[in-house]
Amino acid sequence: MKFAIVVNGSPSSSQAAATALRFTEAALHQGVDVLRVFFYGESVLTANRLTHPPQDETNLTQRWQQLASDHDVELIVCIAAAVRRGVMDEREAKRYEHTADNLADGFELSGLGQLVDASIGADRVITFGGRA
Amino acid sequence: MVLHTVNSSPTQSRCLEDCLQLIRPPAVLLLIEDGVYGATTAHQALLDQLPDEISCTVLQPDVDARGLRPLLSERFDLVDDNGFVELTMKCDRVQSWY
C-alpha cells in the first residue's frame, strides 16, 4: 500500500504538521510505503531551519528531518509557496541575491508536478489542512 | 467507502456541518485535532440525522490532549494513530475537511 501525504497548515498556528508527522510515523511502522510528503501553503514554514520553538515543545522541523533520514522519505516543499514566505535553498537564495539560505536539510524545494506525480503513484492521498 | 476527516470544532467552523451534508454511506467519519470537540455530547444533535451505517470515530490522542474522554458521545469509537492508518487503508479514498 502506497501513501502520499499533503500538509497544508502552518506549523505554528495549526496542528497539521504535527498530526501529519504522527500519521506518517504510524504508517511507516505498519509497513506502508510513503512515496512522498508534500508541504504546501503555510506548511512550508516547517522547512525553515531558523525556527526555534521553546525547548519544552516539539521541534517539528527536527522530527521531520529525523523521520526522513530514518525511513528515506522524500520531503518536498512547494517552491512557489516557500519563496513567497522566505524559505530558500542555496540556489533560490542566490537567484534572489540573498546572503544566506534557510532550507533545513532533508527537505527539497520543487514544483507542484511532484504532488501530481505522487498522487498518481499512490493508492491513497491524505491531506492535513490548516484553517483558511 | 470514503473516510471523511474533520479537523475543526463545530464552534469554530462549518467543517463538520458541511461534511455531514455531503457524507453518504458507505463512509467513516473521523474527527481529528480540534474536530474532536464535535464528538462530545454537547454537539450530539448535529449527528441526529446521520444514518447508522456511517461509523463515527474520533482520534484518541487528540481527545486525550484536550481531556475530553468523559464528555464523549456514545456514537463515537476511539481510534489511535495506527487505527487512523488502518481506516485509510480500509477506505478507498480520504476526504479531508478543514
Image (cartoon, rainbow, N blue to C red):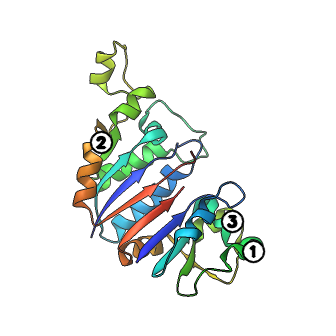
Tell which subunit mark 3 falls on.
Answer: B
Which residue is identified by label 3? B37
Q: Nearer the viewer, mark 3 or mark 1?
A: 3
Inter-mark Cα distance, 2 to 1: 42 Å
Q: Is residue A50 above or below residue A108?
A: above
- Rendered-image quadrant of the C terminus of chain A: top right
Q: Nearer the viewer, residue A17 or A31?
A: A17
Tell which subunit mark 2 falls on.
Answer: A
| Residue B6 visible in this rendered orientation of the protein | yes
Q: Nearer the viewer, residue A123 or A99?
A: A123
Which residue is identified by label 2? A112
The residue lying at 35 percent from left, 48 percent from top is A38
Which residue is identified by label 1? B71
Give neighbour class at mark 1: few <14, some 14-19, many 20+ (Cα, 10 Å): few
Amino acid tagged 3: Tyr
User: A122 left or right of B83?
Assistant: left
Q: Disc count in the image? A: 3
Answer yes or no: do the residues labelled 2 and 1 have beta carbons within 8 Å?
A: no
Give how far across and how far down residue A14 sits, in percent: 57, 47
